[in-house]
Image (cartoon, helix red, strand yellow):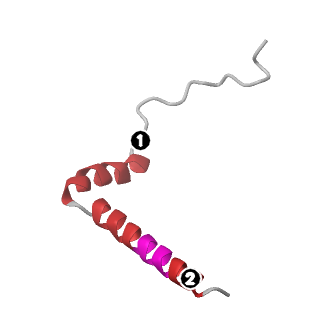
Amino acid sequence: MNPVWGLVAGIFIVLMMLTFIGIWIWAWRSRHQQVFQRMAQLPLEDEDEPDTDTDTKEDRP
């Protein structure tokens, strides 16, 4: 096996680690906190009106 593949694999792993750490830092910045808090509360919100779309495939002409 060629020793260049080990070097290429090492560089690739380091680049992937740096990408992961960069995304992690970006996601945890304080300016994103409000957006993430709002998104976290979406599943807990009640719908104001019940779903009135009762059209099924059988009802369609």
Q: In which quarter of the image is residue 27?
A: bottom left
Q: Nearer the viewer, residue 32 or 61?
A: 32
Instruction: Give the residue number, with chain letter if any, for mark 1.
Output: 46
**Residue at image location 80% in from the left, 22% down from the top:** 58
Helix, strand or loop at label 2? It is: helix
Q: Mark 1 to mark 2: distance in Å? A: 58 Å
Q: How crowded is mark 1: few (under 14 residues within 10 Å), some or many (20 or more)?
A: few
| Magenta-colored stretch includes residue 11 | yes
User: In the figure, is residue 25 to the left or right of 9?
Assistant: left
Instruction: Give the residues in magenta.
Output: 10-17
Q: Residue furthest top?
A: 61
Helix, strand or loop at label 1? It is: loop
Task: Pick the quarter of the image with the C terminus.
Answer: top right
- Residue 47: image location, x then y, percent: 43, 36
Q: Nearer the viewer, residue 29 or 23?
A: 23
Q: Nearer the viewer, mark 1 or mark 2?
A: 2
Indicate the amino acid at tag 2: Val
Q: In which quarter of the image is residue 46?
A: top left
- Residue 7: image location, x then y, percent: 51, 82
